[in-house]
Image (cartoon, helix red, strand yellow):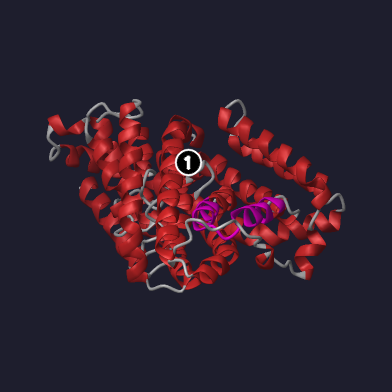
Amino acid sequence: MLALLGLATILALLVAIMTNKLSPLVALIIIPVAASLIGGFGVETTKFIVSGIKDIAPVAAMFVFAIVFFGIVTDAGMMDPIIDRILRFVGLRPTRIVMGSALLALIIHLDGSGAVTFLVTIPAMLPLFDRLGMDKRILALVVSLAAGVNFLPWTGPVLRASAALKVPVTDIFSPLVFVQLVGLVFVFSVAYVLGKREEKRLGLTGAKGESADIHARVLSAEEEKVRRPHLFWANIALTAVILGTMISGVVDASVMFMIGTVLALILNYPGVKDQKARVDAHAKAALMMASILFAAGAFTGIMRGTGMLTAMATSAAGFVPAEFASHMPFAVGIASMPLSMLFDPDSYYFGVMPVIAHVYQSFGGAPIEIAQASILGQMTTGFPVSPLTPATFLVVGLCGISLGEHQKFAIPYLFAATVLMTVTAALIGVFPF
């Protein structure tokens, strides 16, 4: 009975979110509450919700303060010299331009937002592609690859995986650092090869690097007002300390970003009025994701508290051959990028992944391995080509290409990145083959 009720709840969640009948926030709360009441748990449902919210609170806190922290240091101009230097360095050599596009996307994606990455990187690099007649599909691909492979502890997929399985984000991310480095080598290798191909196609193999100053970005009056260029190195040092300490696991990630946010405000905007303005500027984005995470806490709290998740996993385990069980993480890793075409992140990480993780656990596996396999592709390398994410349409719109062109050109490379990282993870023992 509980297994069937749980299955109906998961299916209802997937259908409601994927058909846009309900927003993820509403679906993650109303559907499990209704299921719990139907299951006869009554007022006890509220206890399940509170338990789930308590478990999710550190993750939500980390995300809120990460958004505000990166927003503050970006407002202060920490990224400006980096972006301008990249633009000057690439000149008019296609190989440099393509690799510079990947590097810029990688740096901008430090704040964890794919949309911001594309909005900053593509307009900065597109004039160079247009001036030389370069293939704009390449620009769309390399920024997608860089953002996709650059999954970080405060990015959506990692946060969702952490929230769904109630494990610290650093426990998920830390074993994958080397895997990610391999993925980044692949990103820049692809960028180099495609850049060389463009040089040959355009007959620019002997071209000298020329100044790209004519493409220097122009800041708005509002942006100039909040910039603090004289504090560039101070902000760089602060960011390095915060990220280094957080990734090391010495101090909890949520605490580090809280401290980092406070220090960034005091350093760059000592006035109370300015501090309030900077927090307000980023509050909307932080609140939007935090509300989703708390709703997810309610969902997972109910699914666990009622026993629906355990019942589903127990039933599903009967259909999984024992000899296949140990290969589940590897199979999930290989399939994770294509799964982005079928499931949006909320549907997958809160609906599908926990069931897979519990089935794997029933065979003696560690659920965290399913989470680690999932983030090697599901809405990481997969999000820039998935029709289920607005970022995909932002990429093609900014580059001036069609969705079909982008998907046909980019999917093989994005899938190859996932396969490479999955194999690497298995080889170094993150999860078994």
Q: Quick check: can you spot residue 61?
A: yes
Q: Please say if 254 is above or below 119.
A: above
Q: Position of residue 50 (x, y in %)?
A: 50, 45
Q: Give the amino acid at mark 1.
A: Ser
Q: Main secondary structure of the magenta part?
A: helix
How many numbered dots are placed on residues in this image? 1
Residue labelled with disc 1: 51
Q: Position of residue 83 (x, y in %)?
A: 65, 54
Q: Position of residue 288 (x, y in %)?
A: 56, 59
- The residue drawn where x is 33% and y is 62% is 409
Q: Secondary structure at mark 1?
A: helix
Q: Position of residue 19 (x, y in %)?
A: 33, 69
Residue in the foreground of this view, choosing between 76 and 56: 76
Question: Which quadrant would residue 125 be assigned to in this image?
Answer: bottom right
Q: Quick check: can you spot residue 307?
A: no
**Magenta region:** 81-102
Q: Please say if 175 is above or below 31.
A: above
Residue in the foreground of this view, choosing between 163 and 139: 139
